[in-house]
Image: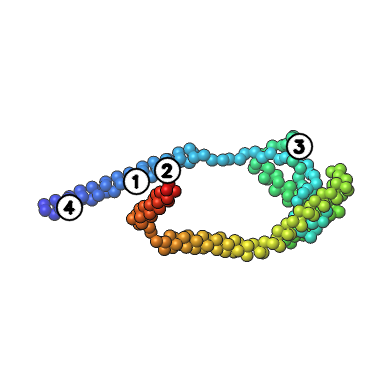
Amino acid sequence: MGSSNLHQCVHHQVLQLQRKSSMKKLNSNVDHNGDHHKGDQKDKNRPHVQFTTIEVRTHSLCIGDNPGGGQFGALGAPISLDWEYDTEHESYNLDEYEERHHNDHNDTTNSSSSKRRSRHQSNGNKLKQWQLILQPFEREFILIHKLGYTKEEINIQRKMIKIDRNQRKHTRRIMIFEPIEIGLEHFRKWRKNRNNNNNININAKTTKDEPQRSPSMDTSTSSSESTSFSCSYCQENK
């Protein structure tokens, strides 16, 4: 009887522990699901941006005013995008446009019309800078024959750009002396503050060294002055 009772007590305790562990798992699952649901609601309520369509605008070309440019870009007048654009722009779905642009790029690379570009990219090498720059005669041809500019307008723009380019070169040359100028400015401020502090100290020292006049001296001086004044007045009456 004793052993059977002990066995029943142990079995009862094991069942209670199993129930407690199962309840804890159930509560943890409920809390986890509740937190996950709250996180989904927060994500839904959080503001976000999504792009669905893309609009392509075609801008016209014009003569530019950029003074930059390398060995080839520094010659002649530059070409830039104009502010005016074609109002009849097309809209595309973003995913479709990306796929179409990717396919067009591959077709253009493999086509015979881009022999120069494909020749330099056949080995997977990137194009160099001089391969992407329009030569001066190419830009001048586009400005005159396609955009309708005259040679006089191109020469005037070229002179203005040359002035801006020279100003940039002058700025780059004097920038090496900028740390020296900053140091001199700090030295001037430090010297000025030091002179002001010295003047304040000198004035304070002189005020301390001056003798202080007592009130008795002031009253004796005033009485002597009044006595001399009365004597002189008496002599004049005599």
Q: CA distance from mark 2 to mark 1?
A: 12 Å
Residues marked 2 and 4 touching at CB (< 8 Å):
no
Residue 8 falls left or right of residue 62:
left
Say which residue appears at 58% left-offset and 62% top-offset.
Answer: 188
Neighbours of disc 4 within 10 Å: few (<14), some (14-19), many (20+):
few
- Residue sticking out furthest to the top: 88
The residue pinned by badge 2 equals 36
The earlier-in-sequence mark between 2 and 1 is 1
Say which residue appears at 69% left-offset and 39% top-offset.
Answer: 55
Whether residue 146 appears in this view of the structure is no
Dot 2 amino acid type: His
Tag 4, which secondary structure? helix
Viewer-closest of 184 and 234: 234
Picture disc at residue 86: 3
Q: CA distance from mark 1 to mark 4?
A: 32 Å
The earlier-in-sequence mark between 2 and 4 is 4
Q: CA distance from mark 4 to mark 3?
A: 92 Å
Mark closer to the observer (2, 4):
2
Query: What is the quadrant of residue 174 in the picture?
Result: bottom right
Q: CA distance from mark 2 to mark 4?
A: 43 Å
Viewer-closest of 166 and 198: 198
The residue pinned by badge 1 equals 28
Neighbours of disc 1 within 10 Å: few (<14), some (14-19), many (20+):
few
The residue pinned by badge 4 equals 7
| Vertical arrangement, residue 190 with respect to residue 44, above or below | below
Whether residue 183 appears in this view of the structure is yes
Q: At which x and y percent is residue 143?
A: 84, 47
Q: At which x and y percent is residue 184?
A: 60, 64
Dot 1 amino acid type: Ser
Query: What is the quadrant of residue 224 in the picture?
Result: bottom left
